[in-house]
Structure formats: C-alpha cells, structure tokens
Image (tube, rainbow, N blue to C red):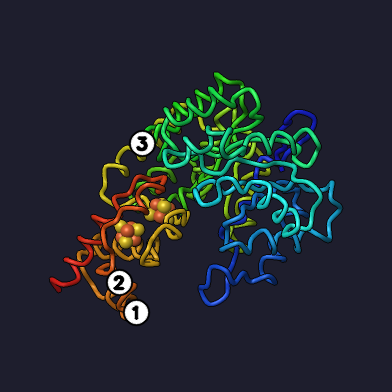
Amino acid sequence: MIYKQFQDVKLSALGFGCMRLPVKNGVYADIDEEAAAEMIDFAMKSGVNYYDTAWGYHDGMSEIVMGKLLKKYPRNSFYLASKFPGYDLGNMGKTEEIFEKQLVKCGVEYFDFYLFHNVCEMNIDAYLDDAKYKTFDFLIKQKRNGRIKHLGFSAHGDLNVMKRFLAEYGEYMEFGQLQINYLDWEFQDARKKAELLKEHNIPVWVMEPLRGGKLASLAKEYEETLKKLRPNEGTPAWAFRFLQTLPDVVVTLSGMSDMAQVKDNIKTFEKAEPLNKTEMQTLLDIAERMTGKSKLPCTACRYCTSHCPKGLSIPELISLYNEHRFTGGGFIAPMALSSYEKDKLPSACVGCRSCEKVCPQGIKISEMMKDFTLRLKEE
Ligand code: SF4
Ligand code: SF4
C-alpha cells in the first residue's frame, strides 16, 4: 500500500468510501453486514487505514455499520472520517445535536477527520452565516477539544462557491475533498479547484475517482486505445493512475461495493505508477470525446432525493432514462418502471426543481422527467 504523509500521520493513499457498501435486495439502507465485514477486514489487512462515512450514507446506516465493523480493531489502527450534513438546510443549526449522535452511531470518542459536507451553491450562505447557525463555531471548538482531530470540507460547488468558503474558513481547513477524475478535470473545473486548494496550501482528498462507476468501463474504442499503451492495466486503474500523477493528492476515496473492487483497487495502490505525458494526453482526449456525448452525468450521490416532495427515486430514474435514451427505446426501462407505483413514475414530477438546487452535477432533472414521460408515452 502506498502511504502519504499528512501532518504527523501516514494515511493510505486509498481510502475506503462507505457510501456504496453491498446491500440486500437492492435496498439502500439494508447493508449486507457480512459481505461488508469481509471487505473491511481485507482492506484493513491490506493496509487501508482511512474510512470515510457520513450522516446520510445508506440512509443513515453507514455510520452505524462502519462503527460496528471497525470496533474490533484498535482505535488507533484506523482513521475514521464523517461529515456534517449541510447538504440539507434542515440540518443547519443542529450541528451539536448531529455531531453527538454521530459519535454514538459510530461508537467512537472522536473523529480523526471531520468535514463540512458538500459545500455548494445551495448551502454556502448558511455555512457562512455563523452568527445564526454556528456550524464553524461548534466544529472548531471540537477540533480544539480533540473530538475532531482534523477539520476539512468537501465541495461540489463551483469555483466561486469554493472561493467564498475558503476566504472565510480557509486558514482553518486542513484538507479539502474534491470530485476529481480525468473526465471532470476540465469538464467540471476540477483542475482549477485543485489549483485553488494549492493556493491555500490545503492538501487534496479525492472523491468520485471513477465518477460513480462511470469510468470503471469505457466504450470499446477507448479501452482499446488504452490497452495499446498499457496492455496489463485495467480500465478502473487508469482513473487511479491519473490521480497518482497529481502531486497534491493525499487520499483517494473509492466507494467499493464488492470484494472484487476492493482487491482490484488495493492492487492498483500497491505501487504508484504515474502516467507519462503521452498517456495523460490520451486520457484527457478520451475525456473530451466522452463529455461531448449526451448522457446525464448522475453519480448516484442521492443528495437530491430528500428534497423531492414526490419522493421520486431520482438517480434510479436517471439511470433508466440514460439507458432508454442511449438504446433509443427498448424494453429495459418500461420493464423496470412497471414495478413502480404510479405516483413514483417520472410523470409524477411536479417540476418544482427543488432537486436541481442540490444536484452537484447540475442536472436539469425536471426537464429530464418531462422528456422521459414523453418518450415513454410515444412508445
Ligand atoms: S422537480 Fe420533480 S423530481 Fe425534482 S424535486 Fe420536484 S418533483 Fe421531485
Ligand atoms: S440527480 Fe444529481 S443529486 Fe441526484 S443522485 Fe444524481 S447526481 Fe446526485
């Protein structure tokens, strides 16, 4: 395992993201604890020492299960990260209440790493309004009393949002977690965001290295191009090699869902094999060609779902929409939708756009629902 020095600790360059743990019967909250335990045990044995959970992952169950699974290991043998769920404005002002619950859920006395979760357009005013909500005030006190060892933030907002956040709190932020992958390097300004952190001397943590699994496999033509350069490298490994090439990246989080992914990722992080100039250019060229395509870039982060007054399963519907549009119709989407209640279909969308305000990918969800409804009617 590659380790990176961060202040006085050595962190595994691969961090275990705990938002896509294996589940039973496709139910997001029903984590398959047995399967997850095997994965965590393997990761621990292989030297992964960073585990990243959050209040909302697996509808609140990730913190509980991770606390349980890590319990058998000495507290100083792993680093546990969690986050204040400011992606939901209803949580603003409840920092203390939530933080105390998180410690109990995880069964720990302190968090090694704690983040302002998802600094973005929707919550930046509230995050900055400390006179009212006291989020920073509370968290910095926890940092000082040792219940938070390292304070940082994750951000899906645009560059201006990040600049506003850092202008206020930058000097206190010890790390910043960004969505960085070769697809978003230019497409979603990841390069500029990483440069902004560098200006503030803040080390980079990476989330969504595979863009929610989208970079785990590529179109055949792209995979063939990459194979010619590195015949023995798997497609997901290319995404990690890209990140190993960026000098300011400390931890790369990967939300692993099965043992095969755990093993594959750990193998990739046995040794850093950064890309050379030709490889880097080839990868960025592929990214440019891919982003020119029309697929909606949902990462299944699920920030939107709690904001939908109709309770629609937005990421699942987007996934079906992508499939349906890409195939030009077909039976898969109608077949899947036949198991939905009528008031959970795309046609139930009332176009309120609450979901769009929190979507880190800027997806025009209401338009998608309308288009999907029309496409389904036309068949
Ligand atoms: S626009 Fe549609 S999908 Fe989005 S929150 Fe409103 S009802 Fe739900
Ligand atoms: S639509 Fe946006 S907010 Fe909702 S799951 Fe997809 S990426 Fe996340």
**Whether residue 155 can be seen here:** yes
Residue 135: x and y in percent read 61, 39
- Looking at the image, do the residues carrying marks 3 and 1 touch, with CB atoms under 8 Å apart? no
Amino acid residing under circle 2: Leu
Mark 3 and mark 1 lie on one chain; the one further toward the N terminus is 3
Mark 2 and mark 3 lie on one chain; the one further toward the N terminus is 3
Q: Quadrant of the N terminus?
A: top right
Amino acid residing under circle 1: Glu
Which residue is identified by label 3? 187
Q: CA distance from mark 2 to mark 3?
A: 31 Å
Rendered view: 282 above or below 34: above
Residue 273: x and y in percent read 59, 36
Q: Nearer the viewer, mark 2 or mark 3?
A: 2
- Looking at the image, do the residues carrying marks 1 and 2 touch, with CB atoms under 8 Å apart? yes
Q: Quadrant of residue 183 in the image?
A: top left
Amino acid residing under circle 3: Phe
Is ligand 2 less than 8 Å from the beta carbon at label 3? Answer: no
Which residue is identified by label 2? 345
Q: Return the residue found at the far right.
A: 74
* Residue at left offset 70%, top offset 33%: 140
| Pointer 2 local density, CA inside 10 Å: few below 14, some 14–19, many at least 20 | many
Residue 181: x and y in percent read 47, 40
Q: CA distance from mark 3 to mark 1?
A: 36 Å
| Pointer 3 local density, CA inside 10 Å: few below 14, some 14–19, many at least 20 | some
**Label number found at residue 341:** 1
Q: Quadrant of residue 281 in the image?
A: top left
